[in-house]
Image (cartoon, rainbow, N blue to C red):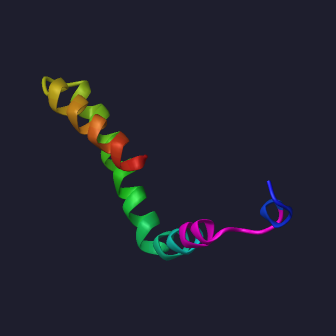
Amino acid sequence: MEGNECTTMGEEDLTINALRKEYLNGNFFKALSHVQEIHANCKVLLRTHDQRAGLELMDMMVVYQE
């Protein structure tokens, strides 16, 4: 690594940081909360005759959370 690489952010890092700030606002956390709520509600489906639907929805919500 060259001298300044250890102590400064590159252009790519700055772009990623800017994108994070843009998207990590109240709407992002509201959507994340909604995904978590849906994931929790899937547990009810797993306890009923709709187990397949519950598993499919849980899988989708895990992808959204990532």
Most foreground residue, 47 or 30: 30
Most foreground residue, 31 or 63: 63
Q: Is residue 51 left or right of residue 40?
A: left
Question: Residue at point 37% right, 62% down?
Answer: 31
Q: Would you say the magenta stretch is mainly helix, strand or loop?
A: helix
Question: Residue 12, how many percent across, how many down?
Answer: 57, 67
Residue 8 on the magenta segment: yes
Question: Residue 45, how many percent across, how many down?
Answer: 22, 32
Most foreground residue, 1 or 58: 1
To which quarter of the image does residue 48 belong? top left
Residue 54 on the magenta segment: no
Question: Residue at point 41% right, 72% down?
Answer: 27
Question: Residue at point 16% right, 32% down?
Answer: 53
To which quarter of the image does residue 2 belong? bottom right
- Above or below: residue 10 compared with residue 55: below
In the image as oriented, which residue stretches furthest toward the right? 3
Question: Residue at point 27% right, 33% down?
Answer: 44
Most foreground residue, 37 or 28: 28
The magenta region covers 7-16
In the image as oriented, which residue stretches furthest toward the front? 2
Q: Is residue 19 left or right of residue 14?
A: left
- Above or below: residue 39 compared with residue 16: above
To which quarter of the image does residue 63 belong? top left
Q: So how many labels did they put on this image?
A: 0
Q: Is residue 46 left or right of residue 14?
A: left
